[in-house]
Amino acid sequence: MSPSAKSSFSRSGVGSGQLVVATMILIAAILAGITVWHHWSKGYASIAYWGAVNGENIRYAPVVELKTAGQTYEISKARGLVHFRQALIEDASFTGATSREEAQPTWTHEVVFSWPDQSESTVVQFDVEKGVVASPDQQSVLVAKPEPTLSGLKTFFADVIATAG
């Protein structure tokens, strides 16, 4: 092989290696963008309903209490709490929203998400018979999907009460 052919071969090898790396970076950036969009879009309507502060409290507040049938249960470390929180802020958990007047809920459960050093908290009300969930300061209620959301809520509440009792 002549010296000029050798140097031409080396340069083309470096160039194609750079092209491969650039292509990999481009593909990774595209996939990262799709992932961010996907995760953002699956909670957009729920977060719009709850609001940013309430959504953050639902997801991260360290103190969580369940109030039902005149009893209060500390559920901050309850089994399944992470999934419970996620279900409340994910659009896939609900079929949509309706007015309180149309739903006519009878609130059977109330969950309070709070921070120990703050007086403000987020309250979420549940009517597990009608399958609706709401913030007390909203005029509409969210309608839970029968499966898996509503059945999961019933199971979660029953497990928490059985464990605490």
Image (cartoon, rainbow, N blue to C red):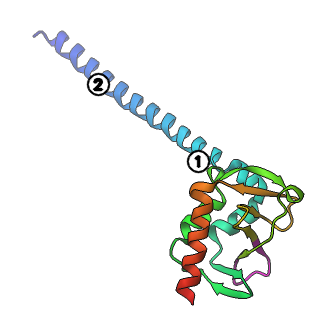
Residue drawn where x is 45% and y is 37% of the image: 28
Query: Which of these two is toward me, 82 or 114?
Result: 82
Residue drawn where x is 50% and y is 75% of the image: 79
Question: Picture coordinates of residue 81 (x, y %)?
Answer: 56, 71
Task: Name the residue type under label 1.
Answer: His
Answer left or right for 2 relative to 24. left
Task: Name the residue type under label 2.
Answer: Val
Question: Picture coordinates of residue 161 (x, y %)?
Answer: 59, 83
Residue drawn where x is 63% and y is 69% of the image: 60
The residues tagged by marks 2 and 1 sit, at their Cα atoms, a distance apart of 38 Å
The residue pinned by badge 1 equals 39
Quick one: SS at disc 2? helix
Quick one: SS at disc 1? helix
The residue pinned by badge 2 equals 14
Q: Which residues are magenta?
A: 113-123
- Asked whether residue 75 is drawn in magenta, I would say no
